[in-house]
Image (cartoon, rainbow, N blue to C red):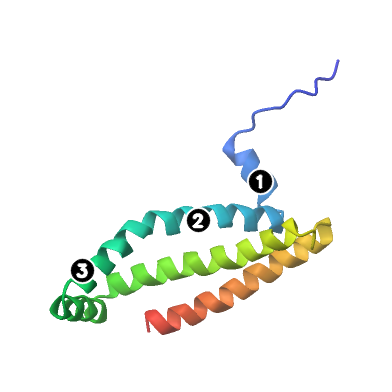
Amino acid sequence: MKSNRPVNLDLGQVLAVNLKNPVAIVSILHRLSGVLVFLLIPVFLYLLQVTLASPASFHTVVQTFADSIFWRLLVFVALAGLTYHFWAGCKHLLADLGIGESLEAARVLSVLVVLVAALFILLGFWWVVL
């Protein structure tokens, strides 16, 4: 007798199935970028608080960012996460409106999201790090 009950798959099997589908990849990366941006909010709120304290503290933070590759990379990672999250969110909003709901259209939009996000992330790298 065949059971229709759900089966618990291990992580390797789940990844093997989902990494073949661009729609699943975009969805998983959208969740991860959202978590990343959420976790970096306190860091940037603290930096905002420091920069608004006085003109001297503002210049200190600006000089720290200019001199430290670590802080520039942190800003780049946050910007990359926000950029990807924005474009993938736009794809999800289009799907909510009924645009791109077919499997083929969802695949095309997913590839387009990755390409557009990669372009903007490269521009962000050039702007922030270099």
Pointer 3 local density, CA inside 10 Å: few below 14, some 14–19, many at least 20: some
Q: Quadrant of residue 26?
A: bottom right
User: Which residue occupies 54% across, 77% down?
Assistant: 120
Which element is circle 3 on? helix
* Residue 66 percent across, percent down from the top left: 25, 82
Are discs 3 and 1 less than 8 Å apart at CB?
no
Q: Position of residue 7 (x, y in %)?
A: 69, 27
The amino acid marked with disc number 3 is: Val
Helix, strand or loop at mark 2 = helix
Foreground disc of the pair 1, 2: 2
Residue type at numbered disc 1 = Ala
Q: Residues within 10 Å of mark 2 (few under 14, many from 20)?
A: some
Name the N-terminal-most of marks 1 and 2.
1
- Mark 2 in CB contact with mark 3 (< 8 angstroms): no
Of the two numbered discs 2 and 3 on the same chain, state the one appearing first in sequence. Answer: 2
Label 1 secondary element: helix
Q: Nearer the viewer, residue 11 or 55?
A: 55
Find residue 128 and name its label: none
Residues under labels 1 and 2: Cα distance? 23 Å
Q: Mark 3 against mark 1, which lies toward the viewer?
A: 3
Q: CA distance from mark 2 to mark 3?
A: 25 Å
In the image, taking residue 63 as reference, residue 29 lies left or right, namely right
Residue lying farthest left? 56
Residue placed furthest toward the right: 1
Task: Give amino acid for label 2.
Answer: Gly
Which residue bears the numbered disc 3? 50
According to the image, label 1 marks what residue?
A: 16
User: Which residue is at 13% across, 79% downward?
Assistant: 56
Where does label 2 land, which residue?
34
